Amino acid sequence: QDLPSSRDWWYPLDARTDVRRGSVCLLQDDIPCAISALEQAVSFAPGNHAYMYLLSKAYRRAGRLDDEAEQRLARLELHNRRVAEYMEMAKLLRQMGHADEVDSLFDDAVAAIPSLRESHARLYALARKQGVHLVVMQYPTFSLEVLHKYAPPAPGVSFIDNESVFATDPDAYFHEPGFPHSFSHYTEEGAKRLAEHVAEHILSLRAEHTSDP
């Protein structure tokens, strides 16, 4: 008998059964079956990001973005408005053509999660005390305007603008472009592109802060 993985052993058996059935339905392109099974899995284990990821794939194939939005809004309430849920909701809004709503969404995030801004303020203070130049960046596709809501410009702090870093070829850089450009899913080429972009900024700082060759 197969044992559940260490990552999902605490979820009800029915959730694992449903998610496996939903995964098979996705592979077979039986989207109604996939949605039915995965909605059931998410209802059993609403905190499981992987289950929501699979359900999102099914919703998108069916063009049911409004249903996904409803699920994600529910997750915001369920998880005490975690930052990750806001990130996923923002990506979905862009996917739905509602990019103009992302700004207000993050206003809500900063208000609902005071530690988001407070933790960056502490980091700024620590870097300043140690005489360290601090570099802050956002995930690809997210703007500096959003980042500045909780990590504002300050002396001794510079920012890497990653909003358009993958714009030239998102299909090559994002592991699965159909899922809303998840910040943790890059192809090998995408990881290289991001690393090059970050390195360019770091090297430019070296030129500014030292006369060494």
Image (cartoon, grey):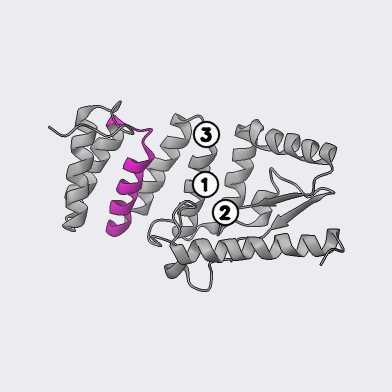
Q: Verify whether residue 90 appears in magenta.
A: no
Callout 1, which amino acid?
Met
Mark 1 surroundings: few (<14), some (14-19) or many (≥20) residues within 10 A: some
Please report whichever mark, 2 or 3, sits nearer to the chain's N-terminal start.
3
Image marks 1 and 2: residues in contact by CB distance under 8 Å? yes
Mark 3 surroundings: few (<14), some (14-19) or many (≥20) residues within 10 A: some
Residue 196 rendering spot, x and y as whole percentages: 60, 65
As drawn, the residue found furthest toward the left would be: 1
Q: In the rendered image, which residue does mark 3 sit on?
A: 81
Mark 2 surroundings: few (<14), some (14-19) or many (≥20) residues within 10 A: some
Callout 2, which amino acid?
Tyr
Secondary structure mainly formed by the magenta segment: helix
Q: Quadrant of residue 78?
A: top left
Residue 4 rendering spot, x and y as whole percentages: 23, 32
Q: Nearer the viewer, mark 2 or mark 3?
A: 2
Viewer-side residue, 103 vs 52:
52
Q: In the rendered image, which residue does mark 2 sit on?
A: 139
What distance separates the C-alpha of mark 1 from that of mark 2?
A: 9 Å
Q: Which mark is residue 87?
A: 1
Disc 1 is placed on an element classified as helix
Callout 3, which amino acid?
Arg
Residue 85 rendering spot, x and y as whole percentages: 48, 41
Q: Nearer the viewer, mark 1 or mark 2?
A: 2
Viewer-side residue, 108 vs 157:
157
Please report whichever mark, 1 or 2, sits nearer to the chain's N-terminal start.
1
Image marks 1 and 3: residues in contact by CB distance under 8 Å? no
What range of the chain is rendered magenta? 44-62
What distance separates the C-alpha of mark 1 from that of mark 3?
A: 11 Å
- Which residue shows up at 20% across the image and 31% down it? 3
As drawn, the residue found furthest toward the bottom would be: 168
